[in-house]
Image (cartoon, grey):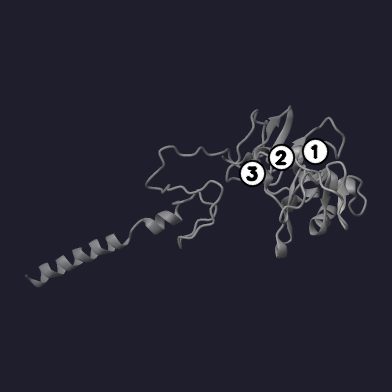
Amino acid sequence: MSKQLWGLFCTLALVVSVGLLQTPTADAHRSGCHRWHSCPSDSGSYVCGDLGISTYCPNQPPTDPPSQPPSTNLPPSSPAPSRPTIDWHTYETAPELRFYWQANGGLSVFGYAKSVTYTQDGHLTQIFERNRLEYHPENPRPYDIQVGLLGEERLIQLGRIWQNEPRATPQPGCRYFAETGHNVCGRLLAYWKSHGLEFDKHRGLSEVESLALFGYPVTENENGVQWFQRARLEDHGGEGVLLGLLGNEVYGTP
């Protein structure tokens, strides 16, 4: 074989080898493969979101692609008429709810908006990661915004009717609520007392303001988790007490 032919053969072999080495896996992953995961990773490890695993890749579109929600760059317009199902997107907080959201805890209490506004019982409503806010303009401030009873609603979804469960007896060092028959103690009680809706513009929070945000306890402390009418308090040890993502759970994709 001549040197020229041998050189041409080597060049062609090199081109083919490079092409074979450039498999689309990593590039496809970066440009969208498994893009329905909440935390995709090129290393192959994942923190999976509520939506689970998808095998979608740019060059292999799904047979039934998920519909995309409206752009989040625009403020909410007229409320949608039906109950939403939330997804992995976040949205603008409705102008009618924004001041209330900011003044009463923001992200740590309500989380991000997870839906556009919609109409529920004739009122503008929006779902947040941790709760549901409803606009009642017929009421004077601050009662024009109401917090949904998502603690009760989530328990019902789980097959629990708290009114049918045993009532507790008062425990030493705890705050006992005779209205529902449950104690709040320790770190959860400290958190409950230190958070609430601002009603009177006075320094500090009253019990009435804490009740307005969380409602009454409807269970006892269950291994560091306690349910309230409007919230679920979770003791995460060194991370502190956090509020459960009830908006995600009640309205999430089945």
Q: Nearer the viewer, residue 232 or 126?
A: 232
Give the total of numbered labels: 3
Q: Quadrant of the C terminus?
A: top right
Where does the image place residue 24, in percent across and percent down from the top left? Answer: 36, 56
- Image quadrant in which the N terminus is located: bottom left
Give the label on residue 94, or none: 2
Residue 37 located left or right of residue 130: left
Q: Nearer the viewer, residue 102 or 88?
A: 88
In which quadrant of the rendered view does residue 114 lie? top right
Residue to which mark 1 is pinned = 145
Task: Name the residue carrying label 3.
Answer: 249
Asked if residue 96 shows in the view, the reply is no
Q: Nearer the viewer, mark 3 or mark 2?
A: 3
Within 10 Å of disc 1 (Cα), the crowding (few <14, some 14-19, many 20+) is: many
Q: Is residue 59 visible?
A: yes
* Label ID, residue 9: none
Question: Which mark lies nearer to you, 3 or 1?
Answer: 3
Residue found at x 48% / y 49%: 53
What residue lies at 88% left-to-right and 44% top-to-bottom? 178
User: Image height check: is 7 above or below 134?
Assistant: below
Distance from the alpha carbon under mark 3 to that under mark 2: 21 Å
Please tell me which of labels 3 and 2 falls first in the chain: 2
**CA separation in Å, label 2 and label 1:** 12 Å
Q: Amino acid at mark 2?
A: Ala
Tell me the residue at 87%/52% (across/down): 175
